[in-house]
Amino acid sequence: MNVILLGAPGAGKGTQAKELAARRGLVQLSTGDMLRGAVKAGTEIGKKAKAIMDRGDLVPDEVVVGIISERIDQPDCANGVILDGFPRTLEQASALDRVLTEKRKKLDAVIELKVDDSKLIERIVGRFTCAKCGEGYHDRFKRPQVRGVCDVCESTEFTRRPDDNAETVTRRLMVYYRETSPLIGYYYCKGNLKSVDGMAEIPDVLASLEAALDARK
Ligand code: ADP
Ligand code: ADP
Ligand code: ZN
């Protein structure tokens, strides 16, 4: 099963994609995580992407399409993927259609996570991540059970993204409405869009997503 999770920055795509992937035997493909990996590794792509990401703009379509197209070919993706943060433009969406057709794969569901803007900002500025295993946390909404210790791997090191600050968030939201929100209409017209209330608590959102996947035609 191949699924797209659509939603604004901070909507909960990463949190939910990780859990859904584990439950359904799928692979989570987050272009944001892959790009941050490239920045950290100092690759050519990473060097070009860093400044763009820091100011909250989008990395060029051909770069992310190339990354996804290569990654989705790997054997571990044969059972299906959850795309988190991709596609983000109409260009990327039609490139994805082409890539999937070429590789004889199909898109089974597109789920939009709906969250109000004020909540998005609150979620983004409080977000932090385990530096070792990547588990996501929040200052108020998802604290580690033992303060300062990762629930999953017991690491005591955490990171915050340089783009998760109040100024850049506004820019990222603007970019989302301009470039990414048209995809909701695009997939609605293709007949595979579902919407889920992303304002609820993390486990409740997960349950709605599971129900949406189970109810698909
Ligand atoms: P968020 O989880 O807040 O939505 P991501 O981790 O998905 O953020 O993305 C972080 C940044 O990486 C984006 O602001 C953008 O610069 C870049 N990026 C990620 N995915 C894409 C994409 N599909 N197209 C272009 N840029 C992307
Ligand atoms: P995205 O990948 O869409 O940018 P994340 O999954 O990283 O979003 O979530 C953003 C922040 O909000 C994280 O700190 C996460 O722990 C928190 N979060 C995610 N879902 C919820 C929710 N349903 N309620 C409260 N906080 C949430
Ligand atoms: Zn950890």
Image: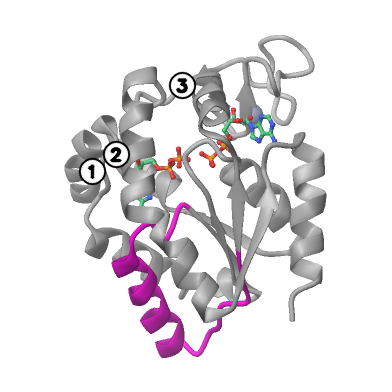
Asked whether the beta carbons under mark 1 and mark 2 sit within 8 Å of each other, the answer is yes
**Left or right of 168 in this view: 157:** right
Relative to the observer, which residue lies in front, 69 or 193? 193
Say which amino acid is labelled 2. Answer: Val
* Magenta residues, start to end: 85-110
| Quadrant location of the N terminus in the rendered image | bottom right
Q: Which of the colour schemes (rainbow, by chain, secondary structure, one colour) is used? A: one colour
Circle 1 — which element? Answer: helix
The crowding category of the residue bearing disc 2, from other C-alpha atoms within 10 Å (few below 14, some 14 to 19, many at least 20), is some
Give whichever of discs 3 and 1 has the lower sequence position.
1
Q: Label for residue 39?
A: 2
Asked whether the beta carbons under mark 3 and mark 2 sit within 8 Å of each other, the answer is no
Give whichever of discs 1 and 2 has the lower sequence position.
2
Give residue 93's position: percent from left, percent from top: 38, 70
Circle 2 — which element? Answer: helix
The crowding category of the residue bearing disc 1, from other C-alpha atoms within 10 Å (few below 14, some 14 to 19, many at least 20), is many
What's the distance in space between the residues labelled 1 and 2, CA to CA?
Answer: 7 Å
What's the distance in space between the residues labelled 3 and 2, CA to CA?
Answer: 15 Å
- Residue at point 52% right, 80% down? 190
Q: Label for residue 160?
A: 3
Ligand 1 within 8 Å of disc 1? The answer is: yes
| Residue for badge 1 | 49
Q: Do we see residue 146 in this rendering?
A: yes
**Left or right of 99 in this view: 111:** right
Give residue 144's position: percent from left, percent from top: 72, 19
| Quadrant location of the C terminus in the rendered image | bottom right
Asked whether the beta carbons under mark 3 and mark 1 sit within 8 Å of each other, the answer is no
- Residue at point 40% right, 65% down? 68
Is residue 64 shown above or below 145?
A: below
Say which amino acid is labelled 3. Answer: Arg
